[in-house]
Amino acid sequence: MAFDIPLAAEIWAGKYRFAPEGGGGDLSVEDSWRRVAHAVAQAEPADRREIWNERFLAALEEFQFLPAGRILAGAGTARAVTLFNCFVMGSLPDDLPGIFEHLREAAVTLQQGGGVGMDFSTLRPAGAPVRGVGADASGPLSFMDVWDAMCRTILSAGQRRGAMMGCLRIDHPDIEAFIDAKRDPSRLRNFNLSVLVTDAFLAALAADEEWPLVFEGQVFRTVRAADLWTRLMSATYAYAEPGVIFIDQVNARNNLAACETISASNPCGEQMLPPYGACLLGSINLARLVAAPFSEGASLDEERLADLTRVAVRFLDNVIDISRFPLAAQEREARDKRRLGLGVTGLADALIFCGLRYGTEEAAAMTRHWLGIIKREAYRCSAQLAAEKGPYPLYDAEVLERPNLLSLDAETRALIAQHGLRNGCLTSIAPTGTTSLVAGNVSSGIEPVFAYAYERKIRQPDGSTRQESVQDYALTVWKRLRGDEEPPEAVFVSAQTLSPRDHLVMQAAAQEVIDSSISKTVNCPEDIDFEAFCGIYLEGWKSGCKGLTTYRPNAVTGSVLSVSSASPPAADPTSASETPLAAREEALEGVTYKIKWPHSAHAVYVTVNDAMIEGRRRPFEIFVNSKNMEHYAWTLALTRMISAVFRRGGDVGFVAEELKAVFDPQGGAWLGGRYVASLPAAIGGVVERHLRHEARAPVGVEPTDAQAPSYVAMAARPAICPRCASAALVRKEGCDTCGDCGYSKCG
């Protein structure tokens, strides 16, 4: 079939097409479907393979069922890759050899294409004595830096950078440093971070009590629970991280609680897993199942939904048996419990087709109904598979008393009681960024539509690019059926127009009928009141969500993608401009920073002065001085160029990034325990910190003025795409996605 948008063909060719050296492989997306269906059918008895090959292929056709990217890219290729997207690594031992053995295991997993999650709560806090060596521990954050550096060097299968989730308990003595870690925009960039929040902490918060910070039974100190919560919320409000995992709810509602304890999640948060846990992902495309969209009788084909669910469960169960695993422990865990993560995508589009507004009680009720069908049929299919192939090895009949199964209908529970279950867990809702784009740009997961129409850059074989209009699948269908008629605003809502409550209502509705968890971002307006923002998390916990991630446009992660057709094109910073330089006032305020560069006998002093421009305090000029005259010529040239950029105004964040990317062939230096690639890179760190208007200085850099500048109402900077350099990088579902070139990176 032809792709609905040219970008879909580009993504398929770049991420999912099998194109071996020497020719052959997939010539079309139909070839990819045939390859995957044939490979997955090999897990069936020989006399049944052709039947299931045809049924699997029928489910894949027209993008009705979307297996996760690792399956699409790897099944039937004989490549040394895993078909699992999600892993949580083993429990970290609190000793150096064990820690670095687990680092090796994570590297192997990332290399084969799996994203990993880790709980660093088992590592002793910074400053704690290390018995037997007469030293103090460096703490979990220092080892997370090591993981982060490792991840930067690993290129995962399918040209996908490794993604990681780092977790720490709310009662760990280093929790405050963990919360603050991403205030440094250059630190832990390959990690998503989540705090494991317990019910006991939330009770202490409600009672305004003191909260002990504990490691191995020893109380290191106590803090006021409300102060710690404010610190966590402030970081999330300002920088969109860390996220929150309500870990007690996760374990209380886990089907497999009798044989495991969960303490971490995969990078995007939809799969909470035990040590060495692994999970397969796949999504049913609800947008393709609505008959007569936009008509009075528009409805989802529930019989087709039930049939697709049964086929998808069998499909994913077979993948467990044909997949490679990076580690033997992961293979044992996967096959002992046979955990699946079947979910949906295109929910928002399906609701639009049926005339339902995302975020309303009616939409939430319909979401529960549709997902309830998937839950019922998934459990029935798993029971029938258990009768045919045997239950999962660790099956215990007491699973029928777990919360997720208590709500099943009597017929389904009777079927499970008779045959057991083939799979320990069955459903979760994952992010489906690029697979949803390939399927015609359907709305992702259970997220609302992010933008109905925008421009993307399509790279051509000769290296040139062309502009291509991309629109959401629902709008495409509307125009196909209604032409130029204006779509109804009442149902064509987007992430930019919905309230945080609308998001919460939908996430809570879905969580009621989902075994594992949900990858979902609650979008918040930039001007949301801080108290209201904090309330989102408490309301999420009360409504049964297992975790929560919010996004509010901010100066570090940027603002949302601009989708207004009336917006002028972004200025090209490399093009000539007639914008006049701002005039300098006689006296300016600023801060001078001191860099102790080890390769120089004398310190380097960097002064950044600010000016009030159009009612905002902005950097205006920079000076670099040192007694060492060796660097005089290039530092003078550098400061004049940077000052000229500052005075022209606009987004100057790229200055810091360009400087930080400079490597000295003679070697960099370690400043404050971190490696800085060159003296210009250290200066870039100063510029970056100054732009972020923080009082504390960069690592290895001391401000000579303790009072950092105070900026008021500084505009949020859009994030820059590392592939095409456009200011169109959007954070959603735990992934950075470029609105221009389609680049996507989780982590």
Image (cartoon, helix red, strand yellow):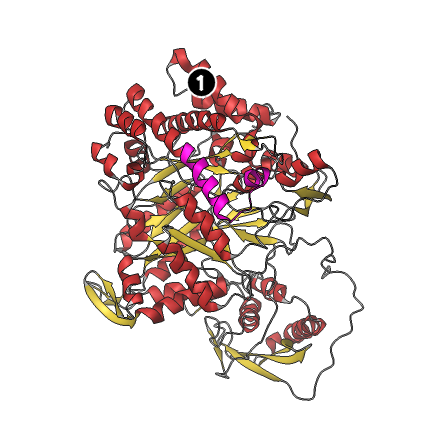
Span highlighted in magenta in the image = 349-374
* Residue 598 rendering spot, x and y as whole percentages: 47, 72
Look at the image and say whether residue 361 sits in the magenta stretch: yes
Which image quarter: residue 653? bottom right
Q: Is residue 433 above or below residue 216?
A: above
Q: Amino acid at mark 1?
A: Trp
* Residue 662 rendering spot, x and y as whole percentages: 58, 62
Image quarter of the N terminus: top right
Q: Which residue is mark 1?
A: 52
Q: Residue at x 39, y 45 (%)?
A: 511
Q: Residue at x 55, y 81 (%)?
A: 592
* Residue 602 rendering spot, x and y as whole percentages: 51, 80
Q: Determine whether, in the image, residue 198 is placed left or right of residue 353.
A: left
Q: Secondary structure at mark 1?
A: helix
**Residue 675 in view here:** no
Look at the image and say whether residue 645 sits in the magenta stretch: no
Which image quarter: residue 191? bottom left
Q: Is residue 535 above or below residue 6?
A: below
Magenta stretch prevailing secondary structure: helix
Q: In front here: 124 or 183? A: 183
